[in-house]
Amino acid sequence: MSDEEEVNSFLPFARASRREHCASLGPAREGLPLWLAPFVLTTLCLDLACSLLVNAVIPLVIPRMLALGVVLGQLVGMTVTAVVAYSPVIPVIVLAFRAKARARRALLEQMTAFTLDATECSVEGDREHVEALVEDAFGTVGRFETVIRTELLSEVSRRYESTTSFSLAALPFFPLALTCVADVLGCDGQDSCATAARFNGFGDDARAFVLANALAWVQIIMCSWTVFPFIFFALARTERLPQRVRTAAGAVVVLSAYGCWALVSGVGSFLSLQAMGAGGLWVRTTCVVWFAGVASWNHYLFRPPRYHGPNN
């Protein structure tokens, strides 16, 4: 039997043991955590502040960039706005990633030297029971320790380096999503949707403007889900740099991620406004292809991780 088959054969037994143990505790109870990781909580609060800062920076930046042209000026203006407004999150993200990297190294070092005898039991009397379960599932304790030090170590290492969960990628931008809803319902800060429609070149068609504004914000949020996977991926590549260079590189990575997000989502916003406005068939087709591309990219980015066994 291969190591992968041994792991898979152990799972049903472990689940059955867990169900038996839970049944002995009486009626089932449901519970929800009352906390989030400090990094996520801090980033949420900062994102709320940055979302408000975006609304304050846009009137200062965009008009000055229109000298480059309407389209180019808006794209450059949105990029500069994102870099300026989200600069406060740089130290939080970099420091949190460094702490995560240290915890990861400590975990991998512990798994490399893992032995069942060195583990701690909350109730020491459970040790014999645990060892009996391990021997029943893996044959010997030594084989179980080998799986931990080889296959499980390899899988944990790969997942640390290659995956970012959707919740971790999307949750920090939740305040921005609320700001988007407020912006759409508030008619882009104008006194009425009719005024906002005329200001953005939609004439008296307020409904078309509201729909275009909503589509633009939807793709902005969809593009934001790439920010943190890119940041974590790029920061991991700076770990071997000297300390001074590493800190500067981390700041550049974070600013680049937010700047690229603003630039890319700015293109999508332009297409959304043009498609619902005076744009022709080719503009609407390009807009549909754009949304399909963003959705497909997110589906690929957050695909379920696959087990990489010895035969893969």
Image: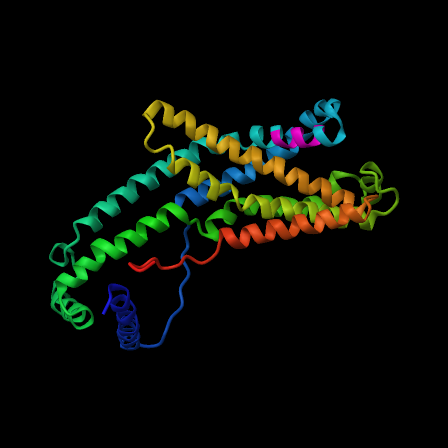
Q: Position of residue 47 (x, y in %)?
A: 53, 39
Residue at 61 percent across and 28 percent down: it is: 80
Placement of 130 over or under 299, stated as above or below: below
Q: Please provide percent x and percent y for residue 259.
A: 57, 33
The residue sitting at 52% across, 35% down in the picture is 257
Residue 243 among those drawn in magenta: no
Position of 175 compared to 135: left or right? right
Residue 18 at what x, y percent from top left? 28, 72
Residue stretch rendered in magenta on the structure: 73-79
Indicate the quadrant where residue 273 lies.
top right
Residue 13 or 32: which is nearer the viewer? 13
**Looking at the image, which is closer to me, 280 or 223?**
280
**Residue 145: % across, % down:** 17, 59
Q: Nearer the viewer, residue 112 or 34?
A: 112
Q: Nearer the viewer, residue 71 or 308?
A: 308
Screen quadrant of the C terminus:
bottom left
- Any part of residue 123 in sight: no
Residue at image location 40% in from the left, 47% down from the top:
162
Split into 4 quadrants, where in the image is the N terminus? Answer: bottom left
Residue located farthest toward the right when viewing the structure as drawn? 204
Report whether 127 appears left or right of 269. Answer: left
Q: Please indicate, yes or no, whether residue 249 appears anywhere in the rendered image.
A: yes
When the figure is inspected, residue 256 is found, relative to residue 192, above or below; the finding is above
Q: How many marks?
A: 0
Q: Is residue 183 left or right of residue 138?
A: right
Principal secondary structure, stretch drawn in magenta: helix
Q: Tell whether position 76 is magenta.
A: yes
